[in-house]
Image: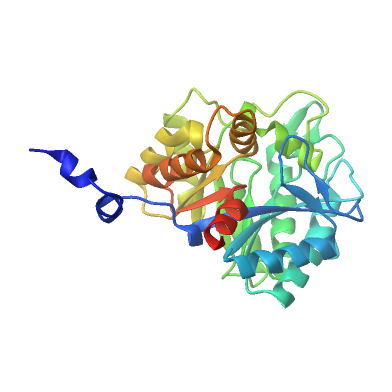
């Protein structure tokens, strides 16, 4: 037996590869900021920007021409308060942006659903005393979901990790007549050190404490599977593992147990570490992007949310 026969040339390797990056299954995150008038590069995330509404819509059109099929939209509002009330304003920055992108493109829009960008305390839920109150937060999540669906979002992506969030959002959407709106659930979202650049992007660092009482303990596999199982039972259409690269084992375990589509979020620091290492001559950027994203698909992800989406598609065009 000589297995090297299957590796003897580029064409042979390509023919017999059992996994590969699917460019049409990459999702590009985008940030719309109500407080700026021109695009601003996000600190520690080279070539990733916050955009004012009009410029983001133009960028979305550019992405569609490039071959991007879907985006994950995040918003930064002018007004923040304890209730995160700007999050469910039908005329809010995300809702307005969804409407305009839908008028100008055929992109599939998934809209991140959380309160951390909208609260003055930076937590993902409402506060009672010194604690994040799970159940009162659920009603707000349902209001946000409905406002996104009314604006035209194809799917909502609840990321707050509140217990029962998928069930409450599904009920809210169905009661409002949006039975066809997808729920892409952040089902196994871990309390990770890999989110720091993102928190700079949307100004969502908590003003006190941390998020470990609601995000997943990275030492637990079985609890992650229980979280996914509950989201499936509550009506999730897609389940997500976040982060991706440090949690390939979780992606694989979810793939082995469930038939639903699996999303994986290739998060901000995963992006920034690779870009920084390439800038310093430690790695070859293109090779490591290819290897890292291939590993996520190989583990079992159906779609990958990645800040490398634009880079990859531009490289393919060139």
* Quarter the C terminus occupies: bottom right
Depth check: 101 or 136 in front? 101
Task: State whether residue 89 appears in this view.
Answer: no
Is 191 above or below relative to 159? above
Residue depicted at 37% across the width and 38% down the height: 253
Give coordinates of residue 255: x percent, y percent: 37, 45
Q: Is residue 9 left or right of residue 168?
A: left
Residue depicted at 84% across the width and 45% down the height: 83
Depth check: 208 or 276 in front? 276
Residue depicted at 70% across the width and 73% down the height: 102
Give coordinates of residue 263: x percent, y percent: 50, 50
Which color scheme does this rendered protein use? rainbow
Residue depicted at 47% across the width and 26% down the height: 220
Total labels: the figure holds 0
Is 278 above or below relative to 107? above
Q: Is residue 221 left or right of residue 202?
A: left
In which quadrant of the rendered view does residue 172 lie?
bottom right
* Quarter the N terminus occupies: top left
Furthest residue toward bottom: 103
Q: In this view, does 227 lie to the left or right of 151?
A: left
Task: State whether residue 96 appears in this view.
Answer: yes
In which quadrant of the rendered view does residue 181 lie?
bottom right
Furthest residue toward left: 1
Give coordinates of residue 217: x percent, y percent: 55, 26
Give coordinates of residue 137: x percent, y percent: 73, 44
């Amino acid at each position: 037996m000589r297995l090297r026969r299957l590796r003897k040339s580029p064409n042979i390797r390509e023919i017999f590869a059992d996994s590969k990056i699917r460019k049409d299954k990459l999702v590009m995150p985008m940030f719309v900021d109500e407080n700026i008038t021109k695009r601003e590069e996000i600190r520690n995330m080279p070539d990733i920007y916050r955009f004012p509404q009009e410029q983001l819509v133009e960028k979305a059109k550019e992405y569609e021409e490039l071959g991007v099929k879907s985006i994950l939209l995040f918003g930064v509002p002018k007004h923040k308060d304890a209730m995160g009330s700007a999050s469910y304003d039908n005329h809010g920055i995300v809702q307005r942006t969804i409407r305009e992108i839908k008028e100008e493109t055929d992109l599939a829009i998934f809209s991140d659903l959380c309160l951390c960008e909208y609260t003055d305390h930076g937590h993902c839920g409402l506060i009672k005393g010194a604690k994040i109150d799970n159940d009162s937060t659920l009603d707000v999540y349902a209001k946000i979901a409905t406002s996104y669906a009314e604006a035209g979002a194809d799917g909502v992506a609840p990321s707050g990790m509140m217990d029962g969030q998928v069930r409450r959002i599904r009920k809210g959407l169905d009661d409002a007549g949006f039975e066809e709106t997808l729920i892409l659930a952040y089902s196994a979202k871990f309390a990770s050190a890999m989110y720091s650049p993102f928190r700079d992007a949307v100004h969502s660092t908590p003003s006190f404490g941390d998020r470990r009482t609601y995000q997943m303990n990275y030492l637990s596999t079985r609890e992650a599977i229980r979280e996914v199982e509950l989201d499936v039972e509550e009506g999730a259409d897609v389940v997500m593992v976040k982060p991706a690269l440090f949690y390939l084992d979780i992606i694989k375990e979810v793939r082995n147990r469930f038939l639903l589509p699996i999303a994986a979020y290739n998060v901000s620091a995963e992006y920034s570490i690779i870009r920084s290492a390439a800038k310093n001559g430690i790695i070859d950027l293109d090779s490591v992007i290819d290897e890292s994203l291939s590993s996520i698909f190989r583990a079992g992800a159906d779609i990958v949310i990645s800040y490398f989406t634009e880079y990859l598609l531009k490289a393919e065009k060139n």
